[in-house]
Image (cartoon, rainbow, N blue to C red):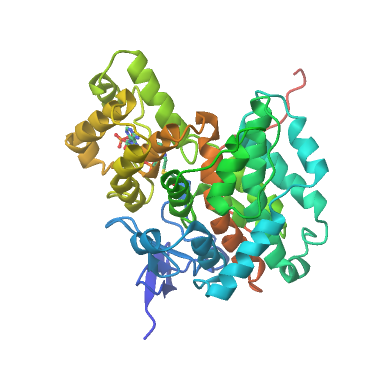
């Protein structure tokens, strides 16, 4: 029997339907609330608001569960590649061998950029932040594919496979080209025989007479990083992607908006902020203890700690941490002062009542910045790496909105608290 919730407001009693998700998540359906009572709900930060029903990702932040399309992240990271997980996130099922081959071939075909797109990237100033370049370039991609980015969802969906391959493959090429341009280096071109992560490393680091060949461990670490970031339900950037899509916008415009949200230091920018924090602590001659005190007194924020949803260990942080020593060993890194500081911070925070009582645990960004630092990815590229990894999620979420015949434009309300009506004085 379907459940309802009763809301008593003024003299009115209202029966509100209850929606239950496939994992037993419960929501009170308030869609008719305003029309019936004149009231709206107030939920600044949307911590209690379900903005959609989605089939893509399940998170239980209290116990630290993350599943893509029903598969636990722990199993996916053990058994699958990033490209397979991207296919799963986008299409709902893990690929067969044939589907995987077709998908990989489409990614290979879409890897190079049009010459105009290359010039577009080359024309940014050399000190441009790569996230600014990425967001602009994703938007610009839409200009190169007007049939696919028509802002008519029905038409755009007819070209969805191509659009998905373009977005997923070219985000990596744009990112690497940006790094080359910012460092005054000639561009590299994608190679047919390399996998997704190997190609990214080649695009980034090959020199004209010195081809970069990734060790299996380094390629695996990059693959792993992308895979762990592939999707994370209604976080800030994904909500923005859905919001832009809800207005009818195309995939590239929606993903570009997601990049802008991800850039913020409280979201994807946290991995860059973690490394900057560790460097500042190191430069200060602190072992981490002074910084912990500052964080407890509200004078600093321990970047890479805390999460809006996870009130337990972020499962992605657990996986990254588990593989961390292996990756460092393979790179021959045994002694690292930033790593020591990170370990001190983690140990101190995990045993301190301030952090325990607020359920502040390390999130995925706490260790991912250190891994990328070890892989010689420059710090301003960290959030771009997150964006490459997150592209499958944005594509899947865009598709969910675009293919939903009942989807509505997202348009929250507000409580106005400004001045009450008044007359403009004669002299201003
Ligand atoms: N260091 C110190 N105190 C903190 C921290 C932190 N990192 N995070 C939260 N707090 C405190 C906060 O001051 C507040 O204390 P009080 O109750 O005394 O006022 C309490 O914990 C609750 O914090 P909140 O800001 O209400 O929590 P939120 O759910 O709104 O914020 C967060 C979540 C991720 C924005 C926040 O924890 C934060 O700023 N963390 C650092 C940035 C970071 O690592 N972000 C990456 C998130 S994971 C990657 C992603 O998915 O985007």
Q: Is residue 144 left or right of residue 378?
A: right
Residue occupying the point 51% across, 48% down: 236
Q: Residue 426 is drawn in which quadrant?
A: top right
Q: Position of residue 165 (x, y in %)?
A: 66, 60
- Image vertical order of residue 27 relative to residue 362, above or below: below
Residue occupying the point 49% across, 41% down: 268
- Image vertical order of residue 236 relative to residue 63, above or below: above
Q: Is residue 422 left or right of residue 361?
A: right
**97 vs 342, nearest the viewer:** 97
Look at the image and tell me in which quarter the N terminus lies.
Answer: bottom left
Q: Residue furthest top?
A: 284
Asked if one can make out residue 74 in the rendered structure from this viewpoint, the answer is yes
Q: Position of residue 194 (x, y in %)?
A: 59, 52
Q: Is residue 39 left or right of residue 258?
A: left
**350 vs 18, nearest the viewer:** 350
Q: Position of residue 153 (x, y in %)?
A: 73, 66
Look at the image and tell me in which quarter the C terminus lies.
Answer: top right
Q: Residue furthest bottom?
A: 1
**240 vs 100, nearest the viewer:** 100
**315 vs 330, nearest the viewer:** 330
């Amino acid at each position: 029997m379907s459940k309802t919730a009763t809301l008593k407001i003024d003299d009115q009693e209202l029966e509100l339907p209850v929606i239950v998700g496939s994992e037993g998540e419960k929501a009170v359906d308030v869609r008719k609330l305003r029309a019936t009572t004149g009231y709206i709900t107030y939920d600044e930060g949307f911590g209690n608001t379900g903005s959609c029903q989605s089939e893509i990702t399940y998170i239980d932040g209290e116990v630290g569960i993350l599943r893509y399309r029903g598969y636990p992240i722990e199993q996916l990271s053990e058994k699958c590649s990033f490209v397979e997980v991207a296919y799963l996130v986008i299409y709902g099922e893990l690929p067969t061998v044939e589907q995987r081959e077709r998908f990989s071939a489409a990614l290979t075909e879409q890897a190079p950029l049009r010459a105009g797109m290359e010039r577009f990237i080359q024309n940014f100033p050399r000190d441009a932040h790569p996230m600014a370049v990425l967001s602009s370039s994703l938007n610009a991609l839409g200009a190169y594919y007007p049939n696919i980015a028509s802002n008519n969802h029905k038409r755009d969906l007819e070209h969805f496979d191509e659009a998905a391959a373009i977005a997923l493959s070219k985000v990596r090429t744009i990112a690497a080209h940006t790094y080359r341009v910012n460092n005054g280096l000639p561009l590299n071109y994608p190679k047919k025989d390399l996998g997704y992560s190997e190609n990214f490393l080649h695009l980034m680091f090959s020199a004209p007479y010195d081809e970069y060949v990734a060790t299996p461990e380094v390629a695996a670490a990059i693959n792993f990083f992308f895979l762990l970031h592939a999707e994370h339900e209604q976080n800030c950037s994904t909500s923005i992607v859905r919001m832009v899509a809800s207005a009818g916008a195309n995939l590239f415009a929606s993903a570009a908006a997601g990049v802008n949200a991800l850039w913020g230091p409280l979201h994807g920018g946290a991995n860059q902020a973690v490394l900057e924090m560790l460097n500042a602590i190191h430069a200060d001659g602190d072992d981490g203890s002074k910084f912990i005190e500052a964080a407890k007194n509200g004078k600093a924020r321990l970047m890479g700690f805390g999460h809006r949803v996870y009130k337990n260990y972020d499962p992605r942080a657990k996986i990254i941490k588990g593989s961390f020593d292996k990756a460092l060993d393979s790179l021959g890194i045994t002694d690292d002062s930033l790593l020591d500081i990170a370990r001190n911070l983690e140990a101190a925070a995990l045993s301190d009542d301030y952090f325990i009582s607020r359920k502040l645990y390390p999130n995925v960004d706490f260790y991912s910045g250190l891994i990328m630092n070890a892989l010689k990815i420059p710090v301003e590229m960290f959030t771009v790496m997150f964006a490459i990894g997150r592209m499958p999620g944005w594509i899947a979420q865009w598709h969910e909105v675009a293919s939903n015949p009942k989807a509505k434009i997202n348009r929250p309300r507000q409580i106005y608290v400004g001045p009450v009506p008044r007359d403009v004085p004669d002299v201003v």
